[in-house]
Image: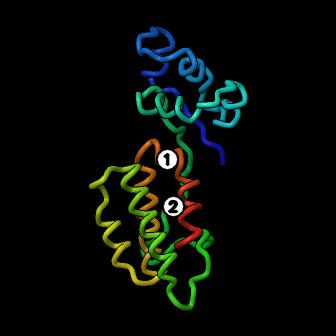
């Protein structure tokens, strides 16, 4: 699934008035955003090696937002959705992979959400003694990561990395 952005009213206004202090590259990318083109097609057209940074600036400045797209329903609290990508639970808890998953959860929340945000998720992750207990924090972790613009942009990459160890 491709990510698609749309201009906000502020973004459309910026194209007319040019008062936001955008760099020429950021302005060019803003022009290319039409609510139909995916990030991949914009990357091919803009030939920008720093497209992720420029999109981040535009999104955080309020010039663009993610296009509305149907989001999958969240799985029920009693476990992960089928096919969520979890590997098979080992017969015996693997302390090394549990510790790696705990640290990954803590570090990504600290990086993308702030050092004191979502402490309950971190505490529950460190209290988990088995892979099944730790997996109960996957959905809250993913929701927390996708609350921020930077987290949304890297959500799938981070999700894949956590699924390798959880």
Compared with 20, 133 (above or below) is: below
In the displayed structure, does residue 61 sit left or right of residue 64? left
Question: Residue at the location (56% across, 35% down)?
Answer: 52
Question: Residue at the location (31% across, 59% down)?
Answer: 118
Which dot marks residue 11?
none
Question: Residue at the location (41% across, 15% down)?
Answer: 20
Q: Nearer the viewer, residue 73 or 28?
A: 28
Q: Position of residue 97 (x, y in %)?
A: 52, 75
Q: Position of residue 10 (x, y in %)?
A: 42, 21
Name the residue that disc number 1 marks.
Answer: 152
Compared with 35, 153 (above or below) is: below
Q: Residue furthest left?
A: 116
Name the residue that disc number 2 marks.
Answer: 73
Q: Residues within 10 Å of mark 2 (few under 14, many from 20)?
A: few
Cα distance, mark 1 to mark 2?
Answer: 17 Å
N-terminal label among 1 and 2: 2
Q: Position of residue 18 (x, y in %)?
A: 46, 10
Compared with 100, 30 (above or below) is: above
Q: Nearer the viewer, residue 50 or 66?
A: 50
Q: Indicate the secondary structure of the residue bearing disc 2.
A: loop
């Amino acid at each position: 699934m491709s990510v698609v952005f749309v201009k906000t009213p502020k973004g459309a206004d910026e194209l007319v008035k040019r008062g936001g202090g955008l760099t020429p590259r950021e302005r060019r990318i803003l022009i290319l955003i039409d609510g139909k083109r995916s990030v991949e097609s914009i990357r091919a057209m803009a030939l920008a090696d720093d497209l992720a940074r420029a999109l981040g600036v535009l999104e955080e400045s309020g010039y663009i937002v993610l296009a509305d797209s149907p989001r999958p329903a969240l799985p029920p609290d009693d476990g992960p959705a089928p096919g969520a990508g979890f590997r098979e639970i080992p017969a015996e808890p693997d302390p090394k992979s549990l510790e790696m998953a705990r640290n990954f959860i803590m570090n990504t929340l600290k990086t993308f959400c702030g050092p004191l945000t979502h402490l309950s998720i971190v505490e529950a992750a460190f209290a988990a003694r088995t892979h099944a207990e730790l997996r109960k924090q996957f959905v809250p972790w993913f929701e927390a990561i996708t609350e921020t613009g930077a987290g949304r942009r890297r959500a799938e990459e981070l999700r894949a990395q956590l699924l390798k160890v959880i």
